[in-house]
Amino acid sequence: MSKLSRRRGRNRANVEREPNGRTKRTYGRDDGTPETKARRMGLAERYDGRYGDPAKTTTPLDALEANGTITADQHKAGEAFGRMYRAVFGRADGSKPFGDHPTDDTMAKVEARLRRRMAAILGGGRRQRDTVVNICAYGRWTRWIPTGNRNREGDIRDIALLETGLNRLIEVSQDEGRRAAEAKAKRAAEKAAEEKAA
């Protein structure tokens, strides 16, 4: 037998190691299976033949923005509406968009904002409200989102209802922003008048 005896077991791999001796982990990006990649590319395909960002196809609202059906402002308004709707009516996944224990005052403000938005959407009819709520709040994939099929009359009508509903949400939020700015300016003017008088 030779002077150097062999160790039992598998040879040690020649890889980079941590200070404790374990092999260093490499954290790479997992893009998913080829089928998932193809599905996401299909969801991100725009109607002019170009492609949006396939990573932004996790929710129906994201997919609609990625494929160019809605604008970034419409997407933002839809997400805000969905967050308010889920906060008021609860959600199945248990997440809390306004903190663990929102105060009654906070929830009253959220409910009032949601009521204004629901009234604006309902101005376009019940079908418009249902379309906006299903896509924005519940994240439901309708028939026409994954396929991009705009040929059916009902699908064309639903897309138009969604776009006008999201535009109404934008108008409501802009109106709220304008009112908040006016109230803030009024409070600042009153405060300045009080300081001047004192």
Image: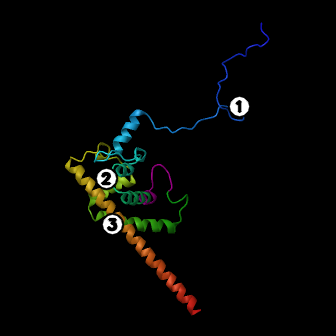
Q: From the viewer's perspective, is residue 52 above or below residue 116?
A: above
| CA distance for labels 1 and 3 | 63 Å
Q: Secondary structure at mark 1?
A: loop
Q: Is residue 86 magenta?
A: yes
Q: Secondary structure at mark 3?
A: helix
Horizontal and vertical percent position of residue 79: 41, 57
Residue range highlighted in magenta: 84-96
Tell me the amino acid under the disc marked 3: Ala
Q: Residues within 10 Å of mark 3 (few under 14, many from 20)?
A: some
Which quarter of the image is occupied by the N terminus?
top right
Horizontal and vertical percent position of residue 66: 37, 49
Q: Quadrant of residue 49?
A: top left
The residue drawn where x is 36% and y is 39% is: 39
Q: Which mark is residue 55?
A: none
Q: Residues within 10 Å of mark 2 (few under 14, many from 20)?
A: some
Q: From the viewer's perspective, is residue 119 above or below residue 96?
A: below
With 23 as the anchor, is 112 left or right in this view? left
Going from N to C along the chain, the mark reached first, 1 or 3, is 1
Tell me the amino acid under the disc marked 1: Gly
> On the image, numbered disc 1 is attached to which residue?
21
Q: From the viewer's perspective, is residue 196 above or below residue 187?
A: below
With 79 as the anchor, is 16 left or right in this view? right
Q: Which mark is residue 69?
A: 2
Which quarter of the image is occupied by the C terminus?
bottom right
> On the image, numbered disc 3 is attached to which residue?
119
Most extreme residue toward the left is 153
